[in-house]
Image (tube, rainbow, N blue to C red):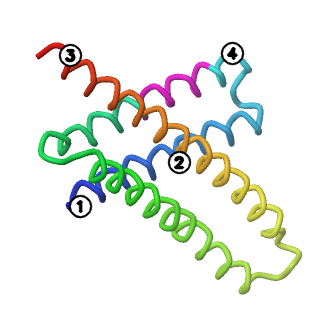
Amino acid sequence: MSRPAVLALAGVNAAAMAVFGAIYGAGALRTLSQPAFVAALLLAFVGAVALWVRVEGRHAHRNDGVARLGRAVGGYAIALLGLPALVLAPMFALGSQLPADAGLDHVASRVMVLLLIGLGLTAVVNAVGALVAAGAALAGRRVR
């Protein structure tokens, strides 16, 4: 398993999580209408899947399916642990310094929900991306 490939997939996953969280946050604040929310979500999903397949496919020609699965799982695991830590650790550190009246507890709970939504949708992006990559690999073998 090559480290640059795993880190590239982790970057794609972290970016997808952030975009999905931002879209859901904008939808929750009612800054997006329902059609705009659905359109943004679909565009982000299709874009994330396309980017995931492209990044994963750069290293697919020299590895088997187990290595591809390892890269995908490794990239998701890094993003799964890394992005919430990068977002929540400073927030909790700041919360311990601020008085309770500041209301950071309410913000932290909302951020956690947005992160959870992003994690779930990114898991779906990984699953759909793996299916697309597998379908493309099978179609490529049939053509030859």
Question: Is residue 43 within the magenta segment?
Answer: yes
Percent x, y for residue 78?
A: 43, 64
Within 10 Å of the Cα at label 4, are there few (<14), some (14-19), or many (20+) other Cα atoms?
few
Q: Which residue is mark 1?
A: 1
Tell me whether circle 4 and circle 2 mark residues in contact (CB < 8 Å): no
Closer to the eye: label 4 or 2: 2
Q: Which residue is mark 2?
A: 17
**Measuring 50% from the left and 30% from the top, which residue is drawn there?**
44
Percent x, y for residue 9?
A: 34, 50
Q: CA distance from mark 4 to mark 2?
A: 21 Å
Q: Which residue is mark 4?
A: 35
Tell me whether circle 4 and circle 3 mark residues in contact (CB < 8 Å): no
**Measuring 62% from the left and 46% from the top, which residue is drawn there?**
120
Q: Earlier in the sequence, mark 1 or mark 4?
A: 1
Type of amino acid at the residue the image marks with label 3: Arg
Closer to the eye: label 2 or 1: 1
Magenta segment, prevailing SS (helix, strand or loop): helix
